[in-house]
Amino acid sequence: MINTDVLIIGAGPTGLFCAHQLGIIGLKCEIVDNLDKIGGQCIELYPDKPIYDIPAIPECTGEELTNNLIEQIKPFSFNFHLSDRVQEVKNENNKWFVKTLKGKEFLTPNIVIAGGVGSFEPRKFPTKNCEKFEENSVLYSVKDKTIFKDKKVVIFGGGDSALDWAIELSKNSNVTLIHRRDEFRGAPASVERIKQLQNEKKVELFTKYSIKDVKGNDNLESVEIKNEEGESKTIDADYVLGFFGLIMQLGPILEWGLNIEKKTIPVNTENFETNKKGIFAIGDICTYPGKLKLILSGFHEGALAARGCFKYARPNEKYRFEFTTTSKTVKGRIGVKE
């Protein structure tokens, strides 16, 4: 049995920053994730994808962000339990007993669900022929962008991932972007950039089109698209990328007695606690009025959830807020010399 102040479920950026905030205020935590590596969706699906919305960092990749967050929490020596999943959660004398698929047992007053619960997989193309090229020429994530250099890349999607990769790959590849609507769901600045690249003939853009078929023998040769009127076009392609979001499978979390709304967990915005005392939810898994699914929002949520954990982990102590720039205690904890 492992006793800890907090158990974090999910080792993505939000969970990692929450761990840092717990360390800053003197709490210990254990971190469980069903993936075999630290970083969550950020490292599993988009390690090479540029990220632009981290304050004071103009651009970084998912891998760079993950590595920096890991470096940030190293002084606290927290333990990670990877390739494992929380199966059982039950209340025992105002503490949570937690058991994982591998049989590990934890006793903790706090659980922080950090968006990494259950499994997730990308939404795929409905076209049957795509299956034989999957993991080779038809891809739903980018793990090594160098393979696209000087290649013909056809990208499907209208959200941030599709737009960001179209912009990024246009630097060294022949890019075609296809979306089933005229309006895009991505950031306005990215939409404007795509239109600029279209005018510069660095990106070819087709809207109100969707995939019809892919063609090729041993290797992918082309992709056929169709519009709402049924008219078809054939585009030469070395790679086809699909960015249609993720299908979340919540798994055992459905049995924990939490309020679930459309695969998300409602929380209060004071400390991101759920309807269960001592269980918090942060990141994409939580919902509240005005919720923005941004990494920076998850950082904010993690910071407040960490403070919410303090009163259950240290019921006889009063939490005293200090700025990290002035706190000698905090500096000592992370090994900073004055």
Image: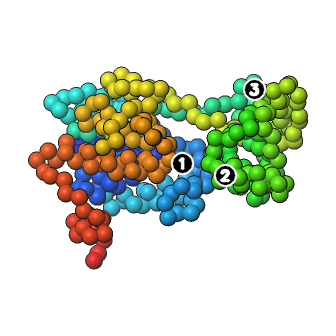
Q: Mark 3 points at which residue?
A: 127
Q: Which comes sooner in the sequence, label 2 or label 1?
A: 1
Decide which of tag 1 and tag 3 comes sooner along the chain: 1
The answer to whether 311 appears left or right of 168 in the picture is left
The residue carrying mark 1 is 43
Q: What residue type is labelled 2?
A: Ser
Q: Which secondary structure, mark 3?
A: loop
Above or below, 150 against 131 in this view is below
Q: Position of residue 151 (x, y in %)?
A: 81, 51
Disc 3 residue type (three-letter): Thr
The C terminus - image quarter: bottom left
Disc 3, disc 2: CB below 8 Å?
no
Residue 50 location (% of width, % of height): 61, 55
Residue 157's disc number: none
Viewer-side label of 3, 2 = 2
Residue at image location 87% in from the left, 39% down from the top: 235
| Residue under label 2 | 190
